[in-house]
Image (cartoon, rainbow, N blue to C red):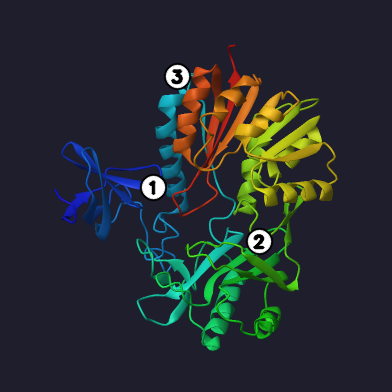
Amino acid sequence: MKRGEICEGTVVRTDYPGMGIIPEGDREIQIRGAIAGEKLRFRITKLRSKKCTGETLEILERAAAETASDCPHFPGCGGCLYRTLPYESQLELKANQIHALLKPVVIESNPSDPYEGILRSPRETAYRNKMEFTFGDEEKNGPMTLGMHRTGSFYDIVNTSACRIVDADILAVRMLVLSFAIESGLPHFHRVNHEGYFRHLLVRKAAATGEILVDLVTTSQARPDLEPLVRSLLDLPLEGKIAGILHTINDGVADTIHNDRTDILWGKDSFSEKLLSLTFKISPFSFFQTNSKGAEVLYSRVRDYIGETKDKVIFDLYSGTGTIAQILSPVAKHVTGVEIMPEAVEAAKENARLNGLGNCDFICGDVLKAVDELSEKPDLIVLDPPREGIHPKALPKIIGFGVSRMVYISCKATSLKRDLEVLQKAGYRVEKYCAADLFPATGHVETVVLMSRVKE
């Protein structure tokens, strides 16, 4: 076997995070998005001694559970992995992946393996409250389009006019902005020569209030009149209501949304969302769970896991915009959130004021350093770190608080697995854990773990 070789094989299982496994002698070949039972024609892209990587060229036979895709852009668009799997099959797949990954670690502290399965998303489609579309072309030198990156391509953009994970309002805004961009005659930003004007479109829509925030991201290489775009957006027949129309300048070379400057073209620079009876003000770049209804399910389970909080001091580490802290604060003595992003901290403070919560404090800083400066001693800790997990030097400091209970929320189970090994060796026992599907049709899954201290 060599790099570039074209092979055939049958997927025997699908491991987290969405990797289909084909055995080949004493090695395994990992193929993104492949489903157990599929027979594939594939190309070897990376060759290692034990694990290789391949890319699907053709699906020769479908798995028994698969059906026709409900999205015309699949599998060309890289946004989804499991559009051919019925939702119940997706849930079973993800639940089994998390269990297989974490069980060997969990049973070191709790041989009974208290896995509670997976929480389903209330919405299987049109669940995203945020979408970042990219301007580009579907093929080199082709007409400009607006959508998602094609699977495996840095350059090609799929025109996602019928995307299934966002609602009709977001798609209507996308179509109108694309029409405006084409009629302007200005080019999209080219990722090689770094020339061009149109870069991204960011659209956010609240599930509870229906408020919509539109942000056009461009370079400063042109200065067209954007007033016609504003008028057209406000005239769109939408189910929701536009709260603000923004224009962000991004002259960076990286293919990411970077905010050099944001101007308000109309309305305001934020919108309101409601979660578990609380109101949250959300700006275009602030972190907020992208599945609002799913987040309510997730945070309800977090609240159940954290248990009795009366007269308790809680630390919410990696607190983001303070969602979890504010959900817990009405039934706690005091909650302190620690978050490294200044914008998120300011949003958390403002949201706490909006909700009349006087027992929340939010500190801007890296958890690694900030925990050294906290004067209070917590009774409980909630951890919701970024994908890479908790900094190895921060874990001993967190353990040093000696809290009786800890809840860990993870968006990357492999990072969680690593951190659980350390926490268990330090005297914590996993009491319960579950998965939560906030991203149907994708390979992503959240995990929630309740730990208790069993030894000093």
Nearer-N-terminus badge (3/2): 3
User: Relative to 184, is 327 on the left or the right?
Assistant: right
Is disc 1 placed on a helix, strand or loop?
Answer: loop
Nearer-N-terminus badge (1/2): 1
Q: Mark 2 points at which residue?
A: 284
Tell me if mark 2 has few (under 14), some (14-19) or many (20+) residues whose alpha carbon lies within 10 angstroms of its own.
Answer: many
Circle 2: residue type: Pro
* In-front residue for pair 66/198: 198
Choose top left, top right, bottom left or bottom right for residue 137.
bottom left
Residue lying at the far left of the rendered structure? 1
Against 160, is 401 above or below? above
Circle 3: residue type: Glu
Q: Mark 1 points at which residue?
A: 18
Residue drawn at x 85%, y 39% as measured from the top left: 358
* In-front residue for pair 329/422: 422
Circle 1: residue type: Gly
Against 397, is 37 above or below? below
Residue drawn at x 46%, y 66% as measured from the top left: 148
Provide residue 228's location: percent of width, then percent of height.
Answer: 67, 86
Is disc 2 placed on a helix, strand or loop?
Answer: loop
User: Relative to 395, is 42 on the left or the right?
Assistant: left
Q: Is residue 332 visible?
A: no
The quarter of the rendered structure image containing the C terminus is: top right
Q: Residue 108 carries which label?
A: 3
